[in-house]
Amino acid sequence: MDTESTAVDETESSVSAEPSGDQPDSGVVIETRNLSKIYRDFWGRKKVRALKSLDIEVRRGEIFGLLGPNGSGKSTTIKLILGLLFPSSGRVLVFDQDAAETSKNERVGYLPEESYLYRFLTAEETLDFYGRLFNMSGAERKRRVDELIKLVGLQGAKHRQLREYSKGMTRRVGLAQALINDPDLILLDEPTTGLDPIGTREMKDLILALRDQGKTVLLCSHQLADVQDVCDRVAILHQGELKELGRVSDLLKVQDITEVHAEGLSEEAKTEIAEVIKRHGGNLKSIDNPTATMEDLFLNIVRESEARPGARRVTGGPATGETPDDQTEAADASNDSEAAQ
């Protein structure tokens, strides 16, 4: 007999019991204890170990990130939290209840990686349908539907069927349905999939706003920028194992490098600073202007374009000796001339 299979079966029996007694509110929304999941084939033979001995805590009012490459166990963890899968060993507690307790789902919102929505319904009809599943009254559903459609920016398309939506628009409807019951815990599996840079930024701003409202968010992603921008703490998974856990700011901090930001320094001041660093035994790597992210650059260009339609800005070094400002002025003049014609 397979001893590992026997041990797993025994563990499954032991963890199926209800939590004993009424526990005081600990401020921990999700807790996994030695959580493992093994997928087996038709004959019960071990096929894939998707998760191995995962121990994490997600606290109330924080954005917690599950980060890892495809196949690292992120989606499996979310399904175990929702009670869609049963652990091979260990335990998952949500609101101090076993994850198998379906009553907890009234306080949970879930956006899966792929939004499986009825494509013949409109956005309004879709959200009204999900509101009915939570036994919301007609007046409450209407108020909540209008509020969420405005929140995700689909006012102009709320009467169109979802089959006419782009992937990004469908993603927004999916987020709205995850929020229809005003949940305390929101599980987001790859929330920025299919969104353009503007939609991605809006999605991240919305996630931050949910935290400001006191919601707890579990964000599952392999997009590094998404996790860095919004998460308070992060767990990094690889091949089903927890490799790192901590606050994002602490994990990203480079301990042996000191960074100084200053404005309006002359070349003489820079030289003097370099001499001071050298005198104190430091190793000056560079003194240069900071760089923005590609996301910041893109969003700034879009905002400028909306504010000044038709204007063009070329930042690259021109071969004619013109400065970027000269090129911008020339482009504006050309646009004005074309408009006049």
Image (spheres, rainbow, N blue to C red):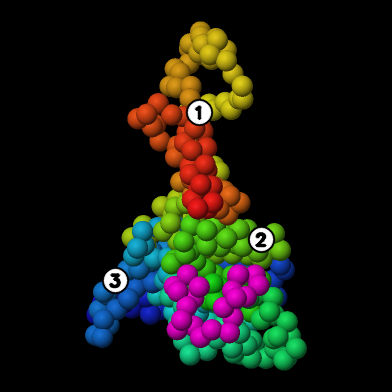
Kindly report the distance in space between the C-alpha atoms of the residues bearing marks 1 and 2.
32 Å
Q: Residue 166 lies in magenta, yes or no?
A: yes
Work out whether residue 324 or residue 20 is closer to the camera in this orientation and state it: 324
Range drawn in magenta:
150-170
Residue wearing tag 2: 209
Work out whether residue 188 or residue 321 is closer to the camera in this orientation and state it: 321
Left or right: where does residue 87 sit relative to residue 173? left
Residues packed near mark 1 inside 10 Å, few (<14), some (14 to 19) or many (20 plus) = few
Q: Is residue 329 above or below residue 112?
A: above
- Circle 2 SS class: helix
Amino acid under disc 1: Asn
Q: Are marks 1 and 2 in contact (CB under 8 Å)?
A: no
Seen at 72% across and 68% down, the residue is: 24
Label whose residue precedes the other's in the sequence (3 or 2): 3
- Circle 1 SS class: loop
Left or right: where does residue 189 sit relative to residue 151? left
Amino acid under disc 3: Val
Question: Furthest residue to the front?
Answer: 341
